[in-house]
Image: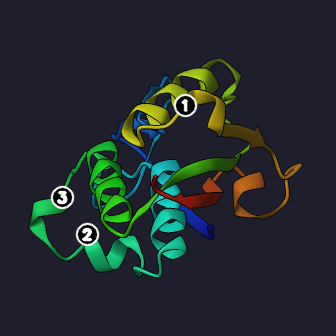
Amino acid sequence: MRIGHGYDVHRFAEGRRLVLGGVEIDYGYGLAGHSDADVLTHAVMDALLGACALGDIGKHFPDTDPEYEGADSMELLRRVHGLIYQQGYELSNLDVTVICEKPKLRNYIESMRCRLSEALCADVGDISVKATTEEGLGFTGEGLGIAVHAVCLLKERN
């Protein structure tokens, strides 16, 4: 078994869609970034890559490469899944915590879990997505952006 941890953060930006876990969220702001800025999926990719000691998403999908401008992070997650599969591993479970004051994510959590499970060829029961606030503290508490922690456990493929 291998354990990985991922963390990512993006600031809010006007004129962009807000996408978290492959789900478009109805909100007045999106997130700044080179790709679709799906901060949740980015943290998940870093956790998976870290578990296999394969570096981070910047190594595999650099923001200096025009190929990834506006990229769909769920497609990049499928590529990362392929990399861990080639290393002989598959997902055992994934636990994600989204940190933001707004928007409220309760109504989107199940859709995020489903999208992640599809991309990772995993049972939705092995995917946990939670959201919390920081009670007005720090940049997320001030409503300036979103941070995400992700932890995964990989097991050897049969």
User: Is there a contact, CB below 8 Å, between mark 1 and mark 3?
Assistant: no
Q: Amino acid at mark 2?
A: Phe
Residue 63 x, y percent position in the rendering: 26, 72
Q: Which residue is mark 3?
A: 69
Q: Amino acid at mark 3?
A: Glu
In the foreground, 144 or 22: 22
Can the viewer see residue 12 in this picture? no
Q: Secondary structure at mark 1?
A: loop
Which residue lies at the image location 53% right of the left edge and 49% below the top edge?
40
User: In screen coordinates, is 88 left or right of 7?
Assistant: left
Query: Considering only vertical position in the picture, is 122 above or below 53?
Result: above
Q: Earlier in the sequence, mark 2 or mark 1?
A: 2
- Mark 1, other Cα within 10 Å: few <14 / some 14–19 / many ≥20: some
Q: What's the mark number on residue 152? A: none
Query: Considering only vertical position in the picture, is 104 above or below 146?
Result: above
Which residue lies at the image location 33% right of the left edge and 43% below the top edge?
74
Q: Nearer the viewer, mark 2 or mark 3?
A: 2
User: In screen coordinates, is 50 left or right of 96?
Assistant: left
Residue 29 x, y percent position in the rendering: 47, 38
**Gap between marks 1 and 3, in whole Å?**
30 Å
Q: Which residue is mark 1?
A: 123
Locate the N terminus by quadrant: bottom right
User: In screen coordinates, is 123 left or right of 5?
Assistant: left
Residue 25 x, y percent position in the rendering: 49, 27
Can the viewer see residue 87 in this picture? yes
- Mark 3, other Cα within 10 Å: few <14 / some 14–19 / many ≥20: some
- Mark 2, other Cα within 10 Å: few <14 / some 14–19 / many ≥20: some
Q: Quadrant of residue 145?
A: bottom right
**Gap between marks 2 and 3, in whole Å?**
10 Å
Q: Earlier in the sequence, mark 2 or mark 3?
A: 2
Q: Which residue is mark 2?
A: 61
